[in-house]
Image: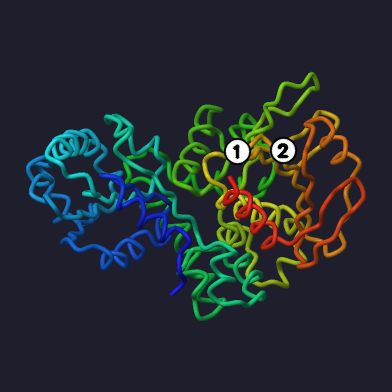
Amino acid sequence: MIIREKYKQLINALKTMPVVALIGPRQVGKTTLSLGLTKQFDKPVTYIDLESDADYNKLTDSEAYLKRFSNQLLIIDEVQRKPELFRILRGIVDERKRNGERACQFLLLGSASVDLLQKSSESLAGRIRYLELSTFTVTEIYENEKDSFNQEKLWLRGGFPDSFLAKTEKESWEWRHDFFVTYVERDIPTMGVGVITTQLKRFWKMLAHYHGNQINLSEFGRSLETSHTSIKNYLDILTDFYMVRQLMPWSGNLKKRLVKSPKVYLRDSGILHSIMQISTMDDLFSHPIIGASWEGFVIENIINQVDDRWEYSYYRTATQAEIDLVLITPDNEIWAIEIKRSTAPKLSRGFYEACKDIKATHKWLVCSNKDQYPLSGEVEVIGILDFIKAIRRKQNFL
């Protein structure tokens, strides 16, 4: 059992908020985590799964059914299948609040973004806390197993539990292949999203080749013989379902000509490698995507650590002055982060120029080794685990 970093946050949220939503991609462990913490509560816990026809039918009269669970914790899985529940929950929560019941009454598990969950429904603002459960992170794996080798295993296989914990590379590979197929052909369509599955599958595969780059939507449209609008829709769908991250460009007030398109990353490195037919570390080390793959892996792990007080983006000018990741801390420090797989990394002049442009207060080079040492220009070379510790120290200080 890998102890999840969200465990304590989820416990605290359940004790202070009437409704908590744990969201993240399918098969990431939301149900396992939720059912595993029910022993922390001294009141009855009921679980219903809206993918089950029998459970779904229980909510034919949703308001009447939900009102039966006073002084209980009701866990509702795959809540995106019934977004109208948000409106009903608001009325129930407000009524119970007037009667003095404040502790958590509902734990919602969802495989879609906050915006998609609340589509066509009334907001639960002030009554709900959203927590995102990611795939396994490097800190979760290291803190549970204390084995640096597993960092490479996590990078190759990705962080979906069934993929990472598979007994063999072959089992992990087959799980990821099946996941990709079923997600496109079954999971996304059953969530009420109207797509042409063959086109979405081709788009996802094309997107893997642009991992870590901006994409030209019109160019993709011509390749897939569809419109620019459809391509944008496909990109947003994969983003809403936590398969893709769109890293937005720096939006500071500069007179320089900046690149304005988001950079696109497949959020799970294992899914990326599966699509690219990379099944072993030897394959990965000899593949041209190794640099972009490592960059995406590091960025995803960093973003999963920062809370919502931080801002993140990338910086690039038309003259190729570039920073892979820019973090703005809650106290307005500007961290410029370059990411290199090399154990003897070097920085380009463009990085230093970009740091001057944004007035970076801290400059970091995150690489694959464990050593930490300074480079010229006040740059600190650091491994990913130590960099995440630096983020945690900053958050605890603030």
Q: Amino acid at mark 1?
A: Pro
**In this view, the mark in front (2 or 1):** 1
Residue 334 badge: 2
Question: Which residue does the image show at 82% across and 35% down from the upper left?
Answer: 354
Question: Which residue is at 63% across, 65% downward?
Answer: 155
In the picture, the quarter occupied by the N terminus is bottom left
Looking at the rendered structure, the secondary structure element under dot 1 is loop
Q: CA distance from mark 2 to mark 1?
A: 10 Å
Quadrant where the C terminus is found in the figure: top right
Residue drawn at (35%, 57%) of the image: 11
Dot 2 and dot 1 residues touching (CB under 8 Å): no
How far across and how far down the image is residue 50, in percent?
Answer: 23, 52
In percent of width and height, residue 303 lies at: 59, 48
Circle count: 2
Q: Amino acid at mark 2?
A: Ile
Residue 377 image offset from top left, x and y in percent: 90, 45
Q: Which mark is residue 330?
A: 1
Q: Counting other residues with Cα less than 10 Å from the Cα at mark 1, is it few (<14), some (14-19), or many (20 or more)? A: some
Query: Mark number for residue 163?
Result: none
**346 with respect to 187 (left or right):** right
Mark 2 nearby-residue class (10 Å; few <14, some 14–19, many ≥20): many
Is 268 located above or below residue 149 in the figure? above
Relative to 233, is 102 on the left or the right? left
Location of residue 331 by image quarter: top right
Give the residue at the far top of this rendering: 255
**353 relative position to 204: left or right:** right
Q: Tell me if I can see residue 205 in this picture.
A: no
- Secondary structure beneath label 2: strand
